[in-house]
Image: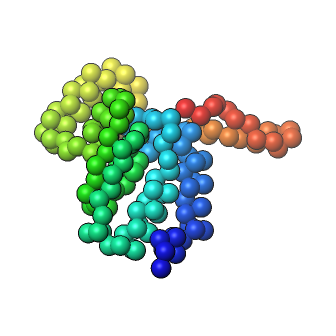
Amino acid sequence: MAIVDHVNWRELDRLVEAHQRNREAHTPVISLFRWWARRPHAVVGAILDAAIAEFGSESFVVADPFSGGGTVAFEAVRRGLPTYAQELYPWPSLGLAICLGQADTTTFGNAGAWLLHRLESHRRQYWREDKGIRWEITHILRVRIASCLLCQSRIYLFRGI
């Protein structure tokens, strides 16, 4: 059986389409940085899953000599595969190392507390209080596309970020 026989092409097409639609406005959670040639994680994941189904996870090591944004390396590490990734350009290499590295939870918590303290004057506008209980608005939903009231065509209220 060939690797391509392990791929659910219809599901992969659906996932890639969703990733491509979202990538102009949303950076995936695992991406601390944008990289110009980032490939959809769904494609890389499907290839790795098919290879695992064909050969078993103990049978190979993933090597990505031109790792760029690190999509291949990240998906391989997510699947517990031994992985080697390198990139000549230092910026994406540092970003990938940060994404794949472990964070000390105490240091991370202290940094978060420091950041919240520094932003407190800006955060106050989002605080609400009722009956002695204070909460903070953490999400604001914005409508990006609306229908024109006259012609029903799509109007972009503001461009993708």
User: Can residue 134 be seen at all in this image of the molecule?
Assistant: no
The answer to whether 43 appears left or right of 10 in the picture is: left
The answer to whether 2 appears left or right of 104 in the picture is: right
Identify the residue at the far right of this view. Answer: 151
Q: Position of residue 139 (x, y in %)?
A: 45, 39
Q: Position of residue 159 (x, y in %)?
A: 63, 31
Residue at image position (45%, 56%) is 44
- Towards the viewer: 12 or 103: 12
Residue at image position (20%, 31%) is 111
Q: Quadrant of residue 70?
A: top left
Residue at image position (36%, 69%) is 52
* Image: 74 above or below 158: below
Q: Position of residue 84 (x, y in %)?
A: 28, 49
- Towards the viewer: 73 or 2: 2
User: Can residue 23 be seen at all in this image of the molecule?
Assistant: yes
Q: Position of residue 15 (x, y in %)?
A: 54, 59
Q: How is the image coloured?
A: rainbow
Identify the residue at the far bottom of this view. Answer: 1
Badge count: 0
* Image: 154 above or below 40: above
Q: Quadrant of residue 48?
A: bottom left
User: Where does the C terminus fall, quadrant-wise?
Assistant: top right
Residue at image position (25%, 57%) is 82
The answer to whether 116 appears left or right of 5 in the picture is: left
* Image: 74 above or below 99: below
